[in-house]
DNA sequence: CCGATAACGACAACCATGTTGTCATTATCC
DNA sequence: GGATAATGACAACATGGTTGTCGTTATCGG
């Protein structure tokens, strides 16, 4: 633990971020159990829910992942019938993707499942600290980006 | 995004937690590059720095991980000469562990490396929101634990 | 129009981190 | 002293990726 109080406070916040992240991940895993998708697949479905008709490289670019990784996720989604291909007028071999009816239903189901825990946790959560935390983490995120782009 | 403003705020906070976590992980990876250890190994070393003379199951219990996983980490630490075994008077086949001189030096080096980014980020960070964020995340952590122990 | 170049799908090979299960050995408890 | 729990060692597997390569397909500059 750093001696400087401000740094100690930041260090403690970082510890909390890690602890919360791990718990959030565990909760998210529970949400996705038994619906045939995992959080990665859900993230890609979210991209397609926000903007339909994207190709695999489109999704990879918008999400920052590798093209190959997104491809494997999309392949799993295709195998599960959650997304379907649509002819791409701009590229013969690179089809556009869209959620199927089943894919939309599964996505909605996961969203529905997460609503209850979210409401339970948000209920009576002190509003002002919540806002402050969101803003502080946005600032921290920004500073970490600066840290990462240091040459 | 949930319609309720309070839930939306919480949702946004969760998004920020994930974003910060990923950046923190990337920064941490940079800190460990070229010193021969990874963050997992460092965590075990931290346990040993805090209390020397623990056995593998001791560390596993205190850190919540599986015994086998800690064993693989400890094996890597032994192979790298970062920790050494000490005879365990209470168990012939389960030696106690201790950081070697090299292990202590490496641990100190990583700690030293992280001091600079920590100080840069903490510098001029608004103190009140930082405290509020730490407290809010502690509360969130607690509520997530309740969520996870729901039957 | 044509050639170079970039982007694409598909596939394989890895890698890292961590879990789970099993076995023989060793402590511990009744 | 005998049942039971704890331990090290090892294998198998799961997950979520990355990296590299290949042949094909668009795109852009001349």
Image (spheres, coloured by chain):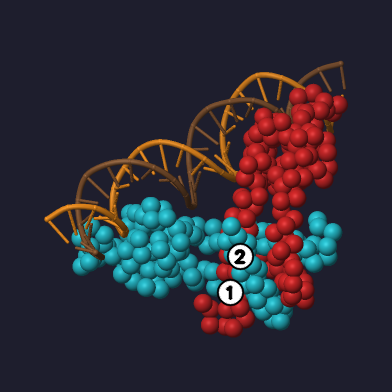
Chain colours: A red, B cyan, C brown, D orange
Q: Nearer the viewer, residue B113 or B141?
A: B141
Q: Position of residue B141 (x, y in %)?
A: 62, 67
Q: Which mark is residue A12?
A: 1
Left or right, residue A79 beside residue B91: right
Q: Residues within 10 Å of mark 1 (few under 14, many from 20)?
A: some
- Residue, x 55% and y 73% (percent of image)? B115
Count of picture labels? 2
Q: Say whether residue D29 is left or right of residue D6.
A: right
Front of the two marks 1 and 2: 2
Circle 2 sits in a helix, a strand or a loop, which is it? helix
Residue in the picture at 62% in, 55% down: A27
The answer to whether C27 is drawn above or below residue A106 in the figure is below
Residue A128: image tag: none
Which of the image's four quarters has the N terminus of chain B?
Answer: bottom right
Q: Are marks 1 and 2 on the same chain?
A: no
* Image position of B85 (left or right of B125): left
Query: Is B55 situated left or right of D25 in this image?
Result: left
Residue that badge 2 annotates: B146
């Amino acid at each position: 633990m750093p001696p400087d109080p401000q740094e100690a406070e930041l260090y403690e916040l970082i510890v909390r971020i890690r602890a919360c992240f791990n718990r959030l991940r565990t909760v998210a895993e529970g949400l996705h159990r038994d619906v045939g998708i995992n959080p990665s697949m859900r993230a890609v479905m979210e991209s397609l829910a926000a903007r339909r008709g994207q190709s695999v490289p489109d999704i990879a670019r918008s999400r920052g992942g590798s093209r190959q990784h997104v491809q494997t996720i999309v392949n799993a989604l295709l195998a599960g019938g959650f997304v379907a291909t649509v002819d791409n007028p701009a590229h013969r071999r690179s089809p556009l993707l869209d959620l199927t009816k089943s894919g939309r239903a599964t996505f909605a189901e996961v969203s529905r499942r997460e609503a209850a825990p979210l409401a339970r946790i948000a209920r009576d959560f002190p509003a002002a600290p919540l806002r402050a935390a969101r803003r502080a983490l946005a600032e921290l995120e920004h500073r970490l980006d600066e840290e990462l782009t240091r040459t």
